[in-house]
Image: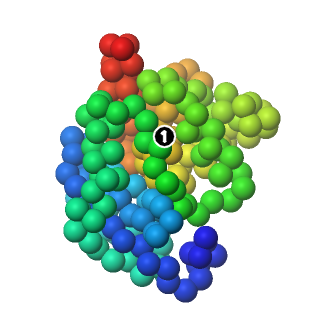
């Protein structure tokens, strides 16, 4: 990825939309989604994007230019869709990439603990590193780090707010049981 090492400006285009989970900001390069941000305001979401990609050329666009991605995410949040198989272009270390790939295999409506995820990686003592990889996930929902919980099953830590995580887990669980 061009922007991985902070190289000179790759263009990242982004748009926002309102949802029942707050403002959604979707950002993408020519290759795929580089960020999905959940926020309380457009300005807060834009500030998160700048923090994530300080050297990128960030270009706001009209939502219709990223309509397919926004529609997929809105359908996911409304329960009309249970997966978000969208093309990604995210910065990641090898470890983050392994964790994020595993996260994408957790079925809708189910959860795993940080320890279980570490064990699935073949690194049973890496639960804290797994938690850190989840905390640095730039693509909320597409990489479903909200499906990782504490060992006792309680929701904890979520980059986009614990209340959002709890609401997402509750939504997925209730829709999963209804199927």
The colour style of the image is rainbow
User: In the image, 63: left or right of 10?
Assistant: left
Label 1 Cα crowd, 10 Å radius (few <14 / some 14-19 / many 20+):
many
Q: Residue at x 27, y 65 (%)?
A: 65
* Quarter of the view holding residue 41: bottom left
Q: Secondary structure at mark 1?
A: loop
Q: Residue at x 39, y 19 (%)?
A: 176
Q: Work out which quarter of the rendered image holds the N terminus and state it.
A: bottom right
Total number of numbered labels? Answer: 1
Q: Residue at x 40, y 55 (%)?
A: 36
Give the x, y percent position of residue 82. 39, 31
Q: Residue at x 33, y 37 (%)?
A: 76
Residue, far bottom: 8
Q: Nearer the viewer, residue 157 or 134?
A: 134
The vertical placement of 72 against 81, above or below, is below
The vertical placement of 16 against 99, above or below, is below
Q: Work out which quarter of the rendered image holds the C terminus and state it.
A: top left
Q: Nearer the viewer, residue 115 or 111?
A: 111
Residue 35 in sight: yes
Give the x, y percent position of residue 57. 42, 81
Q: Nearer the viewer, residue 141 or 151?
A: 141
Residue 40 in sight: no
The vertical placement of 9 against 172, above or below, is below
Give the x, y percent position of residue 40. 25, 53
Give the x, y percent position of residue 136. 54, 54
User: In the image, 166: left or right of 75?
Assistant: right
Q: Which residue is mark 1?
A: 144
């Amino acid at each position: 990825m061009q922007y991985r090492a902070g190289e000179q400006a790759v263009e990242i285009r982004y748009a926002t939309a309102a949802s029942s989970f707050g403002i959604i900001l979707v950002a993408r390069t020519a290759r795929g989604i580089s960020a999905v941000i959940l926020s309380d305001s457009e300005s807060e979401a834009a500030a998160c994007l700048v923090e994530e990609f300080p050297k990128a050329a960030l270009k706001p666009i009209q939502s219709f230019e990223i309509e397919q991605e926004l529609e997929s995410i809105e359908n996911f949040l409304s329960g009309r869709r249970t997966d978000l198989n969208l093309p990604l272009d995210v910065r990641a270390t090898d470890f983050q990439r392994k964790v994020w790939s595993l996260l994408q295999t957790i079925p809708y409506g189910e959860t795993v603990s940080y320890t279980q995820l570490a064990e699935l990686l073949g690194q049973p003592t890496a639960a804290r590193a797994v938690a850190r990889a989840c905390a640095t996930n730039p693509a909320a929902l597409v990489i479903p780090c909200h499906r990782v919980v504490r060992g006792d099953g309680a929701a904890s830590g979520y980059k986009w707010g614990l209340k959002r995580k709890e609401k997402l887990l509750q939504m997925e669980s209730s829709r999963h049981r209804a199927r």
